[in-house]
Image (spheres, coloured by chain):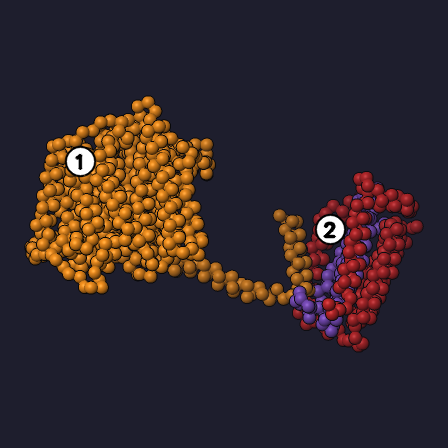
Chain colours: A purple, B orange, C red
């Protein structure tokens, strides 16, 4: 008897855990990992809503699918930026990257 | 007649050309270009006048209004729109002739007079601009176009009066002229707005059509402070005219404006700018007559007082240009009086015709007087009478032409001033005897002070001049305009003016009223003889008389302290009791609130600046918090 | 499958996922953090399996676990010096973050409770049968309503842009 709420509760907690990490972590990569958690939570929501509320359609699933693809792309770019920042700053401390210039 | 627009456009193009590339030309070339352009204008104006008066103007028995060119510029509603166009009717055609003639003479004269001045090219550019504004003013098809050019006249006269901008007195004079006329124009603008608000049109033709029916009907019933709104509107419009035409008490700018170069004085104060007010009232005459006869009466009294007032001051002035300035005020006031006492239609409209007639003749002899005075100043390098005398032996042409002009302004038959002044006096005689006798007395004063001026300059003992300061006759560029204007001054009075210009555009016949004419001749000749007695030979009699007059003499010499009165009004009343509180309000309340805003902004931004840390995690925190707050708001509101 | 067993399995999966998430964001070592992330993502794939979205689960594992996490690992190797201690933030920040996520969780649960998902009879019975690959393929490639060719193509262009952008950003600056 798995209800929709169970999924939602899990995703909510995961979402806020991700946000907590996003705010408190110092390394840029750790921040990015937290971001992955947030996005993951959202994708769970899409899939769960689709299955429970509109089981005969596929929008939610495809949204999750596209979301995964976009996340992958975003991660690639973000990591490229982080590597570049590391070259410039010598570390990946997010506090040191407070100015939007090289 | 479409080419009549060229009369207006040519000076403007000249202004652009001389103003933009004039500095690269040789002064003589620039002057010659300006003069030739103005000559072209004059030829065109004469052609237009000829065509209008002898070919196309007369339809049936009356003179028609022709609009050869009209361009709708700003369209507010179907009825209310500002046009730029050319309106040809007897008075505007006459003004075209007068303006282009005098302007051309001034252009030629300036070639000699201004020779070697720095800014010679600028001078010619400004002359062209002034001519352009004045020509645009007289051909205006609607009151708003007139207002636009009216202000242009103000601006260009400002820059001409302040031509010697290194001289503080010239700068002060130009500012005074601009501010005083601008102040009057405020009334003009308000008047225009009231008028157009009720009549829904700016167009002269619609305003004056059918005995100004539009104005009299559309204003029905509205009153303000006991006077009808139409009266207010037209009185305010007259205020603009009074400012430009130097009517008491707005005359104070004109004497100071003599700081400009003398040919400029001739152009501005003889023929063009100062008659703009007269022209305005004449243009709107049916409206004044039918919608607000009270205002016309007021104009008559203001004019009569100004005529007397200025003439009394002119008697005692020692600066020859100032004498001419006050005589201008006095003569313009004559024209105003003539309009004020005039009635409408046929022979009753004699005053209207006389006013335009006097405008016409006065333009020539006053321009001649100014240019003659300029010639004298050119010769002796001074404006003061005491530096002159006995000049008739050195400057024969100037002497003769100046005498002709003095005869004309004194109203001696058969010079032009006699005819026009006679018509004005006749018009006043039939309508307002009190005003007639005032004007009659002023005519005597005019003859006296003009001949005082003449004798002081050209006779008055046998003064000797030092070798290298020896006065000499002016060069031909200055002498030729004098002669031409002298011819005009003699003969322009012989034109049967009533055939061409009348209040209702219907020709009528005038005859010389010999009773009035003989009265004015007697007083003029008396004035001349008194002047001859006192000033022909150097004597102490004038000083003795001045001594006896005491206070009156001093008051007149000080121009009845009008400058001081205005100074007191502006400095003490306006500045202290109006401007100071406003300044305080501005400094403390307006600026204070602005500074307060700035202070609050600065403090709060200092406080907030910590938030703009560049720390993405701070931003995230606030972003999520904000999102949650909005979610709560959505939930509960 | 027995619903109770199902529920128990789901609960274990969910709890594990949350626990791993917490580990992922609290561990000092970045490499461990990435590993925990990998496990979370695999658990998420399990959740998708509970929802009967087999294809989505497969994508999750292959793209996320197979691609993204490997990227992370490489990036960590490239940027982290050995034994770099991750200096802890000041305590205040933890406090604020904790307050905020408590508040947020509260708000979200309140919204769940308020909305009619709860207590409504929404236990839709869905079978065990998978979505056919044919249907997914047609939906992804079709141009009808509820078909996704356009987003698919847009996404592919975006991926291309990301590839180029990633290369451009990450390459070493040359003397131009």
Q: Quadrant of residue C45?
A: bottom right
Q: Is residue B239 visible?
A: no
For the point 60% across and 66% down, the residue is B610
Q: Label 2: which residue?
A: C112
For the point 21% across and 49% down, the residue is B397
B353 displayed left or right of C73: left
Residue B71 x, y percent position in the rendering: 45, 36
For the point 28% across and 30% down, the residue is B500
Please say if B512 is above or below B189.
above
Q: Nearer the viewer, mark 1 or mark 2?
A: 1
Residue B348 x, y percent position in the rendering: 22, 28
Residue A52 x, y percent position in the rendering: 81, 46
Q: CA distance from mark 1 to mark 2?
A: 104 Å
Please say if A89 is above or below B341.
below
Q: Label 1: which residue?
A: B422
User: In the image shown, does B146 or B453 lie closer to the viewer?
Assistant: B453
Q: The residue marked by circle 2 belongs to what chain?
A: C
């Amino acid at each position: 008897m798995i209800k929709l709420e169970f999924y939602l509760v899990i995703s909510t907690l995961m979402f806020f855990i991700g946000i907590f990490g996003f705010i408190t972590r110092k390394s840029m990569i750790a921040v990015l990992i937290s971001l992955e958690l947030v996005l993951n939570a959202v994708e769970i929501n899409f899939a769960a809503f689709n299955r429970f509320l509109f089981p005969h359609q596929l929008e939610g699933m495809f949204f999750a699918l596209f979301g995964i693809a976009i996340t992958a792309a975003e991660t690639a770019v973000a990591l490229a930026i982080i590597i570049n920042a590391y070259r410039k700053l010598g570390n990946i401390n997010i506090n040191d990257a407070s100015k939007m210039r090289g | 007649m479409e080419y009549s627009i060229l009369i207006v456009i040519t000076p403007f193009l000249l202004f652009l050309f001389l103003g933009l590339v004039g500095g690269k030309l040789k002064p003589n070339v620039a002057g010659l270009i300006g003069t030739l352009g103005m000559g072209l204008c004059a030829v065109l104006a004469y052609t237009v006048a000829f065509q209008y008066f002898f070919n196309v103007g007369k339809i049936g028995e009356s003179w028609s209004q022709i609009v050869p060119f009209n361009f709708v510029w700003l369209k507010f509603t179907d009825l209310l729109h500002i046009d730029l166009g050319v309106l040809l009717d007897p008075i505007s055609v006459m003004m075209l002739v007068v303006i282009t003639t005098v302007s051309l003479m001034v252009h030629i004269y300036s070639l000699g007079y201004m020779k070697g001045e720095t800014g010679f090219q600028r001078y010619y550019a400004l002359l062209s601009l002034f001519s352009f504004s004045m020509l645009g003013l007289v051909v205006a098809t609607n009151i708003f176009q007139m207002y636009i050019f009216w202000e242009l006249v103000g601006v260009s006269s400002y820059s001409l009066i302040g031509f010697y901008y290194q001289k503080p007195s010239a700068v002060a004079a130009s500012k005074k002229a601009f501010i005083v006329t601008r102040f009057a124009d405020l009334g003009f603008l308000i008047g225009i707005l009231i008028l157009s608000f009720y009549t829904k049109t700016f167009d002269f033709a619609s305003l004056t059509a059918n005995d100004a029916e539009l104005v009299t009907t559309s204003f029905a019933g509205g009153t303000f402070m006991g006077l009808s709104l139409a009266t207010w509107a037209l009185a305010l419009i007259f205020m603009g005219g009074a400012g430009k035409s130097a009517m008491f008490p707005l005359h104070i700018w004109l004497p100071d404006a003599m700081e400009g170069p003398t040919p400029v004085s001739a152009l501005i104060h003889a023929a063009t700018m100062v008659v703009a007010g007269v022209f305005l009232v004449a243009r709107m005459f049916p409206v004044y007559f039918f919608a607000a006869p009270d205002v016309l009466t007021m104009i008559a009294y203001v004019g009569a007082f100004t005529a007397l007032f200025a003439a009394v001051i002119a008697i005692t002035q020692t600066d020859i240009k100032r004498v001419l300035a006050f005589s201008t005020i006095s003569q313009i006031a004559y024209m105003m009086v003539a309009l004020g006492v005039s009635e409408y239609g046929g022979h009753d409209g004699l005053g209207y015709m006389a006013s335009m007639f006097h405008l016409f003749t006065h333009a020539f002899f006053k321009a001649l007087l100014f240019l003659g005075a300029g010639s004298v100043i050119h010769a002796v390098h001074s404006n003061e009478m005491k530096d002159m005398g006995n000049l008739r032996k050195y400057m024969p042409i100037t002497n003769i032409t100046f005498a002709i002009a003095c005869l004309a302004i004194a109203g001696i038959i058969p010079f032009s001033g006699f005819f026009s002044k006679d018509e004005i006096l006749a018009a006043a005689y039939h309508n307002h005897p009190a005003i007639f006798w005032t004007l009659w007395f002023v005519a005597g004063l005019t003859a006296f002070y003009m001949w005082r001026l003449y004798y002081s300059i050209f006779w008055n003992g046998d003064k000797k001049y030092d070798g290298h300061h020896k006065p000499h006759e002016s060069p031909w560029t200055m002498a030729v305009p004098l002669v031409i204007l002298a011819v005009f001054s003699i003969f322009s009075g012989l034109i049967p003016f009533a055939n061409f210009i009348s209040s209702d555009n219907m020709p009528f016949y005038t005859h010389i009223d010999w009773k009035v004419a003989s009265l004015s001749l007697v007083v003029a000749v008396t004035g001349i003889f008194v002047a001859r007695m006192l000033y022909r030979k150097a004597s102490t009699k004038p000083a003795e008389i001045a001594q006896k007059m005491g206070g009156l003499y001093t008051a007149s010499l000080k121009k009845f302290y009008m400058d001081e009165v205005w100074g007191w009004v502006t400095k003490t009343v306006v500045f202290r009791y109006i401007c100071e509180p406003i300044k305080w309000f501005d400094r403390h309340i307006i600026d204070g609130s602005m500074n307060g805003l700035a202070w609050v902004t600065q403090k709060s931004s200092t406080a907030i600046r910590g938030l703009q840390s560049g720390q993405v995690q701070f931003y995230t925190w606030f972003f999520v918090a904000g999102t949650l707050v909005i979610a709560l708001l959505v939930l509960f509101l | 499958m027995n619903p109770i067993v199902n529920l128990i399995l789901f609960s274990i999966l969910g709890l594990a996922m949350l626990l791993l998430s917490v580990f992922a964001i609290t561990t000092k070592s970045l490499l461990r953090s990435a590993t925990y992330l990998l496990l979370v993502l695999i658990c998420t794939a399990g959740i998708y399996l509970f929802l009967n979205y087999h294809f989505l689960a497969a994508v999750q594992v292959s793209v996320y676990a197979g691609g993204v996490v490997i990227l992370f690992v490489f990036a960590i190797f490239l940027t982290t010096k050995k034994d770099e201690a991750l200096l802890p933030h000041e305590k205040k920040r933890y406090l604020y973050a904790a307050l905020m996520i408590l508040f947020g969780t509260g708000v979200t649960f309140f919204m769940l409770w308020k909305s009619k998902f709860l207590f409504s009879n929404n236990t839709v019975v869905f079978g065990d049968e998978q979505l056919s690959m044919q249907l997914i393929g047609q939906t992804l490639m079709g141009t009808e309503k509820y078909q996704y060719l356009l987003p698919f193509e847009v996404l592919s262009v975006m991926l291309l842009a990301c590839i180029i952008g990633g290369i451009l950003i990450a390459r070493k600056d040359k003397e131009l």
